[in-house]
Amino acid sequence: MSFDAATFKPASDLLKDRVILVTGASDGIGAVAAQTYAAHGATVILHGRSEAKLEKIYDAIEQAGGPQPALVPLDLSTATAVEYNQLAVMLEQEFGRLDGLLHNAGVLGDITPLEMYDPDTWDYVMKINLRAPYMLTQSLLPLLKASDDASVIFTTSSVGRRARAFWGAYAISKNGTEGLSQMLADELLNTSNIRVNCLNPGATRTAMRATAYPGENPMSLKTAHDIMPLYLWLMSAESRGTTGQSLDAQPK
Ligand code: NDP
């Protein structure tokens, strides 16, 4: 099955009884994805670095009548192997399995020539955008394997397919994300119920996009709500059999 935006009409219980972790659920696309998943029946585990910001998303989900979410604050720029394992143990005790993992958290870093790129910024971007998805996936694989039908989504970007001048560590981290997704999809093919794909949201009206393109009119862009159909489809049983792909929420 492939995704067809014209015919995909998600039922309100599309994700009923699914347990889904969303990283970077405090703002931007992640905040909307978490609320959208909850609105379609999922129990959402909200990850972010700011507990105060996550609590607002938690409250919004509760007020909308969604299943009670969980909160997991963790700063991905400093997270240790011990902390990732503590998170996995906590989720094992609370839920016993994980049906979905949306790696959405990310930072832009600097837009500047490689010649001038600051090494500390490079390491910071790589830790959040590439090391964290690797570490989190590794620690949560036993829980994903405990699901009958699990979906892992990595977030890529157009510069993850073809790096462009001045995009620095962001472009390289997203190139690495594409490779990580392909490799994991291959490793899990035929040996698990886990599918693994990359999703490129495309130009979307968020704080990150405004920082990257300060001269752009945000009203000319799609909102995070507009791009949710592909996020829903990839998390649902409808995408069973789709793995190792890199998909666009806004195809050209
Ligand atoms: P935002 O900047 O709006 O949101 C980023 C999210 O990541 C926030 O929840 C933020 O938390 C979280 N985050 C950042 N640093 C950390 C950290 N150290 N630890 C934990 N969480 C952290 O970005 P977008 O919503 O625009 O982007 C979401 C994803 O989509 C990213 O992976 C981005 O690369 C990708 N993307 C976006 C595009 C766009 O046009 N918007 C285009 C292509 C790809 P906090 O709220 O605390 O800042």
Image (cartoon, grey):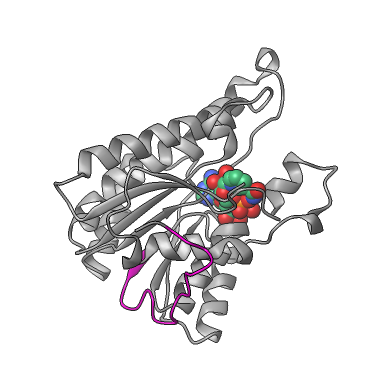
User: How many marks overall?
Assistant: 0
Magenta stretch: dominant secondary structure? loop
Choose top left, top right, bottom left or bottom right for residue 220: bottom right
Question: Relative to residue 203, is residue 170 depicted above or below?
Answer: above
Residue 223 in picture, x, y percent from top left: 68, 61
Q: Which of the two residues, 40 or 87, is positioned nearer the viewer here?
A: 40
Q: Is residue 80 visible?
A: no
Residue 159 in picture, x, y percent from top left: 58, 33
Question: Relative to residue 52, is residue 144 depicted above or below?
Answer: above
Picture residue at 39% right of the left edge, 32% below the top: 179
Question: Relative to residue 224, is residue 152 depicted above or below?
Answer: above
* Magenta stretch: includes residue 113: no
Residue 169 in picture, x, y percent from top left: 57, 27
**Quarter of the figure that contains the N terminus:** bottom left
Question: Relative to residue 184, is residue 112 depicted above or below?
Answer: above
Residue 124 in picture, x, y percent from top left: 55, 32
Choose top left, top right, bottom left or bottom right for residue 138: top left
- Horizontal relation, residue 203 to residue 133: left or right: right
Extent of the magenta region: 3-21
